[in-house]
């Protein structure tokens, strides 16, 4: 398989939001789900916290009342590629727009102590790496990022986070998931290789469970 | 010995992929206007067609205005951007040949309400939809879960979902509920107990004497909110109640239905099957539940004190403080001290006929309190609306000062004209009290239709009487 060499390392400044249960409605509010596009969500990431006004789809950042206190609005965090947060990040709605907003903003990895199931899954389909770490490690990272600007290097293949080139933290993620990011695999192509098996399964099911195939 | 989830998993297992993931065959796929446009676009770009057209059923719900009247069509939606999305669904369904209950249809409604009531959700099915509340359909004994837009495209193209197996959790609700306690209270209590991440990674099977005793509508309320406990799958084994429900809604011919019933009757967890986690809850002591904060787990008995940063463990202080701030809770110590502005009875959690009956029972002959500027009832579907009108429930609500609407997601989320204004406080029968969920800076308190009806009449979360 051809690997995407850029996909092997994530290097960047860490921004952080110190709270639990950040749901996908916070990552991107409902208003922006009205878009029928797959890109262009960067200005709406964490909209409710990033701005002091009520946003509308299509209204650009420059026209908004920006909340200067919010971390992503300030340099160098506005360039950040890694987001540190706490428990149950991405819970709630299944909207993939939440991942699109993180991706479009430039976030390539999110570090948290746990994630909502559907969000976690959606991440890998869009090249965003969710990394879960135990709570004490999250605590330690928060201790660091609150003191100074921290740069991390994340080695996807070895599954190691390098901290300011001194400390190392190992993390776990299923092979098939991370390979999707490293190689940029397309799920539909992979599944369609099994199309005979699916057809056979279906043929058989039509006989054993005919009610599934009866339509009004 | 297997659990119900194990059996549904095996029944739909097509093959295991090299990656270790499995391909699960999908029996039913529901679509709505918000999470499908990018999936259809992807399909077109790859020059693919839906694998099995008849598996798909679509309806617009999130964006539709709930004051429409007769003969309203997609082009008449005032909000230009909402209109694009609804029109896009019309276009995609036409282009690809997918059955849609469109905005003009008398059967249109919230996707999770119409599926079961039109007989499209059947026990033992795998069901997916680009919406996290797909767990609702688990109430009929389905393996049902919410998926993202990439997966919507994948299911359209392949009729399969690529997944890894979840862990099994059994939650047994035992006992008889107290007066004024409905399944909404039971599930809110449960979420308060295990937290919004408590079910992450699990398929939760709900069982116990309470579950056996309640209707399919009440069961749907519970499975609907499994996702609020972090579990993308909630399910309940089919029983006589389920089969009676399905029989009534079914469009199957007699012979096929009988064959199906034989299968459904034996579709349950084997005795002695192993669960990774088991919880038993005595529900007889549960009081009506009302959320005070910005996560469904921030819930208390309607007459309890609201938590303060002083009386919770250290690692939770910040969450409590942020939530109290957002919700505008200052010196008030109890929920009954808060003054409400709006009441919303609706959403895929509580907009079925049983919910409306329960609320109507309470508001009958009474009047909405003066401080409530707007109290709306939004039936979950055209069918629910018709049934309620036949029973005269609409008149009961209207006489009390409620506004009777057309079906849709309405004030459950701020995508259509029904929204809270900044700082407005709302008694809502929906499922999420997240910041801004019902409108920018709006404040949501989740509760049952019974408690929402009382709040409308009292103007505050009062003593049910
Ligand atoms: S009613 Fe609310 S929760 Fe249910 S599908 Fe609509 S927006 Fe989602």
Image: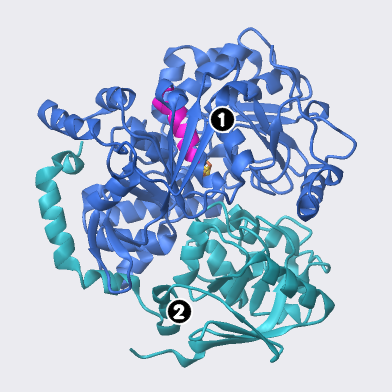
Above or below — where is B354 with respect to B167? above
Whole-angstrom CA distance, mark 1 to mark 2, is 41 Å
Colour-to-chain, cyan = A
Asked whether B219 falls inside the magenta stretch, the response is yes
Query: What residue span does the magenta drawing correspond to?
Result: B214-224
Colour-to-chain, blue = B
Q: Position of residue B408 (x, y in %)?
A: 49, 37
The residue marked by circle 2 belongs to what chain? A
Q: Is residue A197 left or right of residue B97?
A: left
- Co-location on one chain, circles 1 and 2: no
Can residue B266 be seen in this snapshot?
yes
**What residue appears at the point 42 percent right and 35 percent down from the top-left corner?**
B113
Q: Which numbered tag is attached to residue B186? A: 1
The residue marked by circle 1 belongs to what chain? B
Question: In this view of the protein, which residue sits in the foreground, B414 or A1?
Answer: A1
Cβ of mark 2 under 8 Å from ligand 1: the answer is: no
């Amino acid at each position: 398989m051809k690997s995407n060499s850029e996909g092997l390392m994530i290097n960047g400044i860490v921004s952080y939001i110190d709270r639990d249960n950040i749901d996908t409605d916070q990552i991107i509010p409902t208003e922006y789900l009205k878009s029928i596009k797959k890109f262009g969500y960067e200005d709406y990431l964490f909209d409710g916290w990033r701005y002091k006004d009520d946003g509308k789809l299509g209204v650009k950042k420059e026209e908004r009342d920006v909340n200067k206190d919010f971390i992503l609005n300030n340099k160098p965090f506005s360039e950040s590629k890694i987001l540190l947060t706490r428990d149950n990040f991405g819970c709630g709605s299944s909207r993939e727009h939440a991942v699109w907003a993180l991706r479009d903003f430039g976030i390539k990895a999110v570090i948290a102590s746990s994630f909502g199931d559907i969000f976690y899954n959606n991440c890998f389909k869009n090249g965003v790496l969710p990394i879960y770490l135990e709570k004490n490690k999250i605590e330690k990272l928060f201790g660091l990022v609150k003191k100074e600007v921290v740069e991390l290097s994340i080695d996807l293949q070895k599954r190691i986070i390098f901290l300011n080139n001194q400390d190392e933290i190992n993390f776990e993620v299923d092979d098939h998931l991370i390979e999707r990011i490293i190689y940029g695999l397309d799920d539909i192509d992979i599944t369609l290789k099994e199309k005979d098996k699916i057809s056979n399964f279906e043929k058989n099911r039509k006989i054993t469970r005919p009610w599934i195939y009866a339509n009004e | 010995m297997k659990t119900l989830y194990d059996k549904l998993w095996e029944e739909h297992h097509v093959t295991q992929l090299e990656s270790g993931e499995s391909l699960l065959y999908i029996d039913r796929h529901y679509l709505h206007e918000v999470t499908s446009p990018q999936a259809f676009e992807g399909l077109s770009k790859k020059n693919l067609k839906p694998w099995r057209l008849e598996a798909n059923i679509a309806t617009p719900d999130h964006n539709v205005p709930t004051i429409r009247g007769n003969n309203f069509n997609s082009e008449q939606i005032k909000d230009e951007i909402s209109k694009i999305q609804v029109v896009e669904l019309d276009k995609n369904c036409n282009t690809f040949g997918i059955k849609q209950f469109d905005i003009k249809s008398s059967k249109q409604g919230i996707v999770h309400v119409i599926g079961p009531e039109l007989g499209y959700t059947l026990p033992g099915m795998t069901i997916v939809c680009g919406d996290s509340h797909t767990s609702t359909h688990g109430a009929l004994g389905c393996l049902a879960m919410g998926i993202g837009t990439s997966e919507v495209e994948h299911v359209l193209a392949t009729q399969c979902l690529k997944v890894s197996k979840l862990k099994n959790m059994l939650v047994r609700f035992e006992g008889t509920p107290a007066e004024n306690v409905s399944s909404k209270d039971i599930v809110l209590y449960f979420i308060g107990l295990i937290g919004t991440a408590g079910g992450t990674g699990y398929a939760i099977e709900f069982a116990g004497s309470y579950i056996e005793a309640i209707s399919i509508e009440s069961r749907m309320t519970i499975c609907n909110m499994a996702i609020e406990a972090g579990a993308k799958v909630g399910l309940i084994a089919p029983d006589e109640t389920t089969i009676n429900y399905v029989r009534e809604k079914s469009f199957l011919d007699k012979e096929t239905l009988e064959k199906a019933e034989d299968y459904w009757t034996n579709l349950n967890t084997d005795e002695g099957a192993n669960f990774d986690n088991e919880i038993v809850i005595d529900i007889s002591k549960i009081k009506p539940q009302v959320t005070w904060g910005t996560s469904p787990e921030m819930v208390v008995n309607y007459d309890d004190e609201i938590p303060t940063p002083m009386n919770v463990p250290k690692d939770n202080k910040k969450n409590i403080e942020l939530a109290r701030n957002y919700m505008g809770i200052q010196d008030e110590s109890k929920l009954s001290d808060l003054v409400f502005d709006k009441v919303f009875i609706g959403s895929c959690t509580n907009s079925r006929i049983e919910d409306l009956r329960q609320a109507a029972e309470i508001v009958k002959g009474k009047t909405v309190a003066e401080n409530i500027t707007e109290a709306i009832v939004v039936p979950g579907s055209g069918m629910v609306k018709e049934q309620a009108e036949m029973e005269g429930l609409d008149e009961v609500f209207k006489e009390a000062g409620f506004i009777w609407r057309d079906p849709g997601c309405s004030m459950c989320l701020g995508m259509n004209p029904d929204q809270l204004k900044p700082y407005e406080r709302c008694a809502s029968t929906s499922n999420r009290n997240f910041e801004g969920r019902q409108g920018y800076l709006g404040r949501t308190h989740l509760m049952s239709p019974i408690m929402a009806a009382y709040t409308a009449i009292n103007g505050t979360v009062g003593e049910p009487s």
